[in-house]
Image (spheres, rainbow, N blue to C red):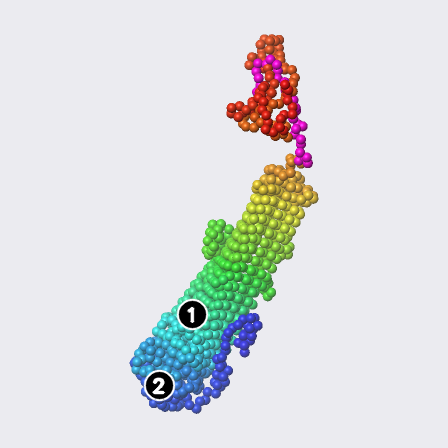
Amino acid sequence: MLILRVLRQLHHQGWKLGIVFTLGISGAIASSRSCVLAQNITTDGTLGPAVTLTGSRYIILPGLGQTVGSNLFHSFRVFNLNQGEIADFKSDVGIKNILARVTGGSLSRIDGKMYTSSPDVNLFFINPYGIIFGPNSSLDVGDKSGRGAFVATTVDALVWPNGSQFSATNPGGPSSLLTIVGDPGGFLTSARTPGPISNLGGTLEVYDNQRLILLGGNVTLSGGELKATGGQVEIGAVGGAGQVDLNLESTGKALGFSDDLVRADVLLTNAAKINATTGQDNGTGTGLIRILGRNISLTNGSQLDTSTYGQGDSGIVAFNATDSVLITGQNTTVFSQVVSGAQGDAGGIGIKAKSFYLTDDAKLTTSTFGLGNSGVVLVQADQVFLDNSAIFSTVESGGVGKALGIQIEAGSIVMNNNAELQTQTSGVGDAGRVILKTNGGLVSLDNSRIFSTVESGGEGDGGGIRIETGTLSLNNGGQLQTLVREGGKGDAGFIYVEATNSVDLRGISPTTGNESGIFSIIDQGAEGGIGSSQFAGGIFDALLSGRGNNIVGSIFIDTGSLSLTDGAQINTSTDGKGNAGAIIVQARDKVSLTNGGAILSGAGENAEGNGGAILMGAGELSIEGTADNRSGLTTQTNGQGDAGLIYVEADRDISVKGDRSGFFSTVEEQGTGTAGAIIVNARSLFLRDGAQVSVNNQEFKEAGDILINTQEDILLLRNAEISATTLSGEGGDIELNVGDFLVLLGNSNISTTAGQAPGGGNGGNIRVNIDRPRATGLWGLPVNDSNITAQAFTGNGGSIRINARRLYSIARRPLNLNTNDINASSTYGQEGLIEINDVDIDPNQGLNNLPQAPVDTSRLIAQRCNVRGEGSEEVNKFTITGRGGIPSSPNNTLQGESVETNWVTTDPPMTNPSEGNSSTNPGGLVPSAMRVPKTPELVEAQGWVYGSHGEVILTAKAPTATPHNPSLIPAVSCNPQ
């Protein structure tokens, strides 16, 4: 059987359904093969005469039962109908409810028609031991203008709000029917499991706007149909003691299950159908299909439908399971639609369970082809598993309205093997939003997709995708995508991902070749509205607010860590009318792009709009690619618009490795716009093995600018490059603000290039600022070819300004293959300006080694005194203030308060040649103020003493003092007496 195959498949995939199919289906089918019964309908005599009815039309008169107020009660020992037989319940005027119980202990087999003669009556049929409806069973109860509900149940008793009971398991009980007033208020079950209810291919239909209720133990629908046009179909499965509430007057649900009520299972198989559509003649009814149980399963082409074909709203489909809901198999469908020509809103689909499984090409669909909105699909479960299946909320071609979207709330959501969630508009109206929430759990898409699209012919906006989870994993072509297709008019929807732990995108689909990724795309021929492009106001507002729901066509990711590998992408692009959206990433820890992992935003060849911005904040960023699988961040345009801005800020380091991997803002050939800017802020930036930071315009406008700020270092190693290039426009500017070192090794370059033959334009400008108090500088290595250049072809060379503490192995000179050069040249224009502010501090510069042995300072002092001039009128004086003195030798200790020193005889004094000799100053031309004064007579100092203020005074006659220490007696005296 199909259901067994599905169970085996899910078991092999590690999924535990917990579904126990103990419904006795095979036995019921075997029993239905022979519907010839010896005894069909017999009353039990508790409420009227005990009689056996015969014939093919059984007239069940009021006198066979008991009438209490507006209720007519019947009690049967046996009740069965063969094919072609009719049970005709007659009632008097004023009867609202006919209530028939079966007390004999055997199940009822109904393969004929249940009929009520009164047009304004409900029929309750109660058999605690089981009810089977055969393939020829049918109903004709009440009418569409009054009452007409049909309730089949296997519970013990009906109960009323005042506590009265109508029991089928204890028909002689103490409760009196005389206390019963009005409609039943519920059902009562004992500890036993109620008998099963099965429909084996019959069509059980009530009139328009009426109710059809099956309430039993395990409930099985194998083929056949339950139908209530514009009305309500409810199925409940009870597995133990408790009470179920009932409200037939409600316009919505009639059955009320408590949370602690033990439940049984419900199975729909073999193309079983439940139909609660709104018909052409019904303008007021609202359909409802509601199933309550422990495990609920739809298999093998079974269908539930609450569509509207007339002028009213269609109703909802609701599943409420304490364990699992399984919907599986090709053509197994749950849908609620507004069909073409109808007017009204489609109802929604709601599923509540511990586990929900949608597998093997099964589908849930709400849509509108007419005038009205499609409904919402809401799933609430601990775990949700979709395999090769789909959920849709759509505005179809010809429809006018909104698709209200898809929302799944679960502990984990897993989609495998081409599973899809899709909201779309092909008519006039917006596509709905897809919302997934896991409360910190997992969302995993393996070769599966979530779409929100404006299709060809559609006029409306994409609703977008919102995911709030712990971990998001997209593998083997797993995708989130908002899209405006060719011929569509409207904005692509916004994609918002909040993953507290991580976002992991990996691989390419083995069947379709599609990359795993997150995409927002405007196709060629589509009109995508204004988009968000790089208009900074809205984008940065979104970044600051942490949401940004109003930025159409953009992608916002807020996560712990982000990983893109093996060709995975985050991509916003436009090839039609409208700007590509922005990409905003906030990662508290690490962003990793490897082996072709890329973040892209671009405008294509046919685009009439700009590429979007890429804004990233991360703990750290690691990019690693190869020549065949480049990784990095790219904004580009190949059309009329501009490439977008790239802004990256990392708390720690940014590392880029691999040929042509890195940061790129590019105008491709055929593009007419300008390249965007690249701004990078990090602790350090490392570019290795051909990695690049590049702005490039391959056409006739300006290249963009590059600004890089690092707290510590920038390292370019082995053919790494920071460049701004334009074919013939003005060169872009590069500014590097570095905390410690800027290092270029292994043929790495920093360059701005304007003009390639035969292009023109002035070279861009390069500014390098390395200005910290620590030892910093611009580094190269000898025998290397790492250069800093600002070149032009026919225009002027650009300017290069470098502020650094020191330049190591790099200098201003013509380009040479074996040196590290700084050059601002032009092939046909003027050379550019080079300005280098190099402090050139060498920590070893100007320092001499100290001698190994100290200098004997006593040998540096002359042991003689200058002779003072004899007969001089003035005495020269040398005074040292403060306490202390001068030792006779640097090797001796200080003397006492008076020290005598021997002085040597000086040379004879010089006389003033002008004094008394007019010939040396003829005509008095030398002013008296300029004349040399007379040399005073000098008296030789014999020692020094301290003055009253502590000053030292040299004196010709010093007092004699006896030192405290004999070693302090001077060895030499200038005037020995």
User: Would you say residue 428 is visible in this rendering?
Assistant: no
Name the quadrant containing residue 923: top right
Q: Position of residue 403 (x, y in %)?
A: 45, 64
Q: Position of residue 412 (x, y in %)?
A: 51, 66
- The residue sitting at 56% across, 58% down in the picture is 563
Q: Earlier in the sequence, mark 1 or mark 2?
A: 2
Q: Of helix, strand and loop, which one carries label 1?
A: strand
Q: Amino acid at mark 1?
A: Ile
- Residue 870 sits inside the magenta stretch: yes
Camera-nearest residue between 815 and 912: 912
- The residue sitting at 54% across, 69% down in the picture is 388
891 is higher (above) or lower (below) than 701: above
Q: Which residue is mark 2?
A: 172
Q: Start and end of the magenta stretch?
A: 850-879
Camera-nearest residue between 554 and 770: 770
Q: Callout 2: 10 Å neighbours few (<14), some, many (20+)? A: few
- The residue sitting at 48% across, 51% down in the picture is 540
Q: CA distance from mark 1 to mark 2?
A: 41 Å
Q: Which residue is mark 1?
A: 316
Q: Position of residue 312 (x, y in %)?
A: 39, 69
